[in-house]
Image (cartoon, rainbow, N blue to C red):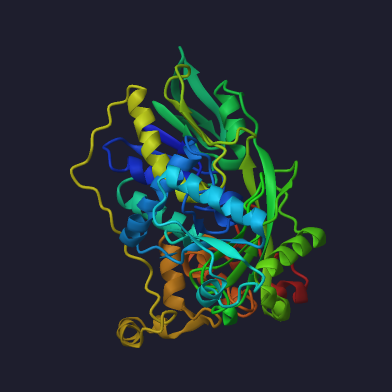
Amino acid sequence: MRSDIVVIGAGITGSTIARQLSKYRQKILVVEKRSDVAFGSPTKGNTGLIHAGYDDPPGTRKAKLCVRGNMLWHSIAKELSAPLKETGSLVVAFNKDEEDHLRQLKKRGEKNGVPLLEIVEDRNRLLKIEPHLNKDATAALFAPTAAITAPYELALAVAENATQNGVKFLFETEVTDIIARNGEIKGIKTSRGRVEADCVINAAGLESDEVSAMAGLGHFTIHPRKGEYYLFDKKLSDLVRHILFPVPTPISKGIVVTSTPEGNVLIGPNALDVEDKDDLNTTATGLSEVFNGALKLVPGLAQYRNRIITYFSSLRPETGTGDFIIRNYDEPKGFVNVAGIRSPGLTAAPAIAEMVVDLIKESGMDLAEKELFISNREPINHAIREFDLSRAERLISEDSNYGHVICRCEHISEAEIVEAVRRGATTLDGVKFRTRASMGRCQGGFCTSHIIRILAKELGIPPTEVTKKGGASRLLLCEAKKLLVGED
């Protein structure tokens, strides 16, 4: 196989880089070892925040790219019809020392170019704009440009748009080596063969240190940092109006209380350094830390434990450098590292993509812009979910499957699931991330068997071959009737 540029990793960073590169005439290939876009922990499991940009020290890549990325996402999300809700954020103080820290954050944010920052010192006003906030709060830093999103949906929207513009995605393909000769990149070796290329971009997330070492660049190590979360059902959608932060610590922005674009309350994460890059176990101690941290901001959560629908953990790629690693090299020429992309990596992604394009040009590749770049993407029709009755009636008249609700919690029809499969979903999680089917109160208790049936039919495989997330994650071991009659 031959490609001009290979991007390793189909998380939010790799997919956004691919979309930015799709504005040029080069042949772009994204290689991902998992089964779909956004299946890696840093993308699918983060808090979904579009940060304003006051956290990171002025002059760092994080600070610069966060502020630029925030601005870009507000327009890109509209182009892609992707979820982004402009809620604003509040960093909440409870004493004079913490109020001093708010002022420092405000000064830092202003140096970084964050607009409209304001410290709210009137407690009555604070409780008016956030009624369920702890009444002991004394002040808060208000950043109106902060927003919330669904990170997996955003990544999928970006990847779909990149595909519209000619980018190819190769899934279930693990990179095993980087090919370089005479100090220049010549391609990659994968579990499915070689790919010739003049440029390789390492956006492999938690595995980016391993990919970098394949290129002879072992100058950093990824240390996974675990964060645990609780997700509440939508009946608490009025509990939180803004993203709520405590005053940050040197290693963490703290336990956040926020909502998803769909109205679920989300709390977390904590921060625990672990050794295993696959360690996604949750712990009683960690979850207790998260819940108690959230109660400090919103004490009323204590009465809603029965509204918790799931808890989960994710891993962030820490390097110990304190900043993103984004750079090209004299040797091997044509290799670009994009590593250590932790918070605010989601926010910074489109600005990172711009920077990567500049680095590729700097390395000597002549990037010629296309005459036509498709900037917009049509989303899956969610008329039932959005309670758009007139549009739902029209869709049902055209396809009766829009009237067959598969996921009752999220109001997802069979037609939407079929469309998700035809857009690239090959697994239960692939359908889930594209439609929200099984993300509701029952967590798939009702709809999973129906989704398996649809996947099997659309993919032309037996139900026993359908997986949760690819690989060996099969959902059904055999047909029950074969057990009953004693067949192998």
User: Can residue 432 be seen by looking at this rendering?
Assistant: yes
Residue 307 versus residue 82 in the image, above or below: below
Q: How many marks?
A: 0
- Outermost residue toward the left in this view: 371
The N terminus, quarter of image:
top left
Q: Quadrant of residue 244?
A: bottom right
Q: Quadrant of residue 207?
A: top right
Residue 390: image x %, image y %?
Answer: 31, 87
Residue 136: image x %, image y %?
Answer: 67, 70
Q: Is residue 298 left or right of residue 485?
A: left
Residue 287 versus residue 114 in the image, above or below: below
Q: Residue at x 67, y 79 (%)?
A: 307
Q: Is residue 255 left or right of residue 429?
A: right
Q: Nearer the viewer, residue 471 or 301?
A: 301
Q: Residue at x 45, y 46 (%)?
A: 66
User: Can residue 472 be seen by looking at this rendering?
Assistant: no
Q: Residue at x 65, y 36 (%)?
A: 222
- Outermost residue toward the right in this view: 285
Q: Nearer the viewer, residue 206 or 109?
A: 109
The C terminus, quarter of image:
bottom right
Residue 123: image x %, image y %?
Answer: 57, 71
Residue 247: image x %, image y %?
Answer: 63, 55
